[in-house]
Amino acid sequence: MQEEQEQEQEAGSDDAWEQRGPPSLLQLAEEQLLQGIRQASRHIEAPFCVGGSLGKLPVQLAVRPAAGASGEVAILCFPDGGRDALAKLVASCAPASFGKGTKEVLDDGYRRALALPADRIFPHFHLAQHPGVLAAVRSLLLPDAGELSARLHTLKVYTQGGFFKPHRDTPRGDPSFVGSLVVCLPVGHAGGALRVEHSGRSVAYGWGPGAAAGEVQWAAFFPSCLHQVLPVQEGARVTLAYELFAQPAGTAKQAQPTALPGTAAELLRALRPAMDCPSFMVNGGRLGFPCKHGYPNSLFEGVTEQAVRQLLKGEDAALLHALEALGIPCKLMRVWKDEEGYDDWAEGWDSEEGLERYKSALRVGPSMAAYLAGADEDVHCQDAGSAWLEYVMQARKDEWVLGGSDRFYYGNYPTTLAEFYCAVAIVAEVPAYADRPAAGAMAWAGRDAAGTRAGSGAAAGPSSPTGSPQAKRAKHDAAEAGEG
């Protein structure tokens, strides 16, 4: 069936080519520039996790009995309490469940661990006494966000043979949920490394030797990244798990742009000549870039787009900054997989408001899911307004973590029909060639260059006569005459 669909697509492409004729030199030049932009956007890399050690540090825990159970609060000390403290902690725990789609399950074939909820533990360990942890997380992972806060949700114990296969940390309705933090207590063990994966890269945190030496170690990562706990070979791996929350930066001082990662330079080099090329999207258009991270659905339900921009992660934030650096207006859109086609969009929605939100998302249809395409092609792709994406931006099918159909995954908690990780696109609104800022105005920290358009009466930055809208229009007319 899939082969038949691919053959139909190829046949349709051949028919369309015969109707339109061979591409012109200008079209070929544009395609080459698009290819360079696409490749450069894929090569952007940014940190997705960070970790460290707080050094040798004793940790004391107060553990109260479960609701309705008899007994006294247990005071446990690590590492001084040794095996006795660990035995009491294990006896206080229950088997750890996890989320499989919308269901909470116990399955020791996927996760073998013990857990204590936050309302039963009172650690004499406070992150506020170690401000460097959250400072490092914000600096490396979320430099555009405002202040970070941490909320303890579970103590976890992985005894010998314990593990947790790949999963994501489930968003639970708070749009400011941006990260996960794991603090490993000083309890000796072997194995049990935390492995975090993202876009073909992985980082492993093996805490056993440091824990045996009495160190408190930690790691933070974006919760939508796949991660796993490898099997514990000996001893017990004891951790405190926190959820991290970030508020959008509230002042101009907090929201100052950060330096672009070095890998974004390739995208800048690809975009700059494209923006100054008369054959590239001469009448303007849109480019779609798939974000590499997932974002909670609630983030787009109750937070302004400007605030969402400040909570973008890693490569997504770098890509947005690169576009803004060249004065290219952008907007963020959720991406949904369209299994049935446009006519079935209205089914399954309880309210008109919900339907409108659904229709305003970018659509990627089954007939050519690997492309964002124009209205003349058989692809269900709709913009937030009434316009269609006007220019093709190639993107591999697996790059679109198709939101809406990607709700049912393994997580540390069950997901819900209202809250899940969305796929997001950054849609760049490329101005018409004659209306673009002059090349000299397109520089990092020159965001006002985006306001320079034909007829505005003033340039936002230095320009030359050859870079003015009038000169560009003349160059374009000359290019068209040469093509003819």
Image (tube, rainbow, N blue to C red):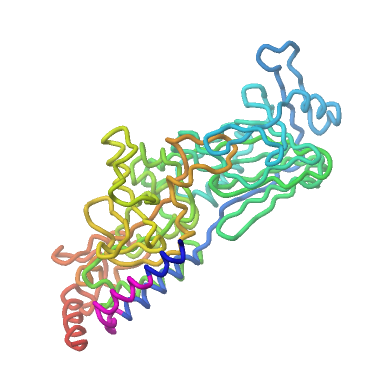
In the rendered image, residue 300, in percent from the top left (x then y), is placed at 37, 42
Number of callouts: 0
Quadrant where the N terminus is found in the figure? bottom left
Please say whether residue 250 is visible from this viewpoint. Answer: yes
Between 254 and 111, the one nearer to me in the picture? 111
In the rendered image, residue 278, in percent from the top left (x then y), is placed at 25, 77
Compared to residue 193, the image places residue 123 above or below, namely above
In the rendered image, residue 452, in percent from the top left (x then y), is placed at 22, 64
Between 442 and 222, the one nearer to me in the picture? 222
In the rendered image, residue 61, in percent from the top left (x then y), is placed at 72, 26
Quadrant where the C terminus is found in the figure? bottom left
- Horizontal side of 373 relative to 321 (left or right) equals left
Measuring 27% from the left and 61% from the top, which residue is drawn there?
A: 450
Compared to residue 183, the image places residue 376 above or below, namely below
Compared to residue 41, the image places residue 77 above or below, namely above
Task: Place residue 387 in its image quadrant.
Answer: bottom left
Compared to residue 325, the image places residue 92 above or below, namely above
- Residue 270 colored magenta? no
Q: Magenta span: helix, strand or loop, mainly?
A: helix
- Residue 19 colored magenta? yes
Between 36 and 334, the one nearer to me in the picture? 334
- Horizontal side of 252 relative to 166 (left or right) equals left
Measuring 32% from the left and 53% from the top, which residue is drawn there?
A: 331
Between 42 and 276, the one nearer to me in the picture? 42
Please say whether residue 449 is visible from this viewpoint. Answer: no
- Horizontal side of 181 relative to 376 (left or right) equals right
Part of the protein shown in magenta? 10-27
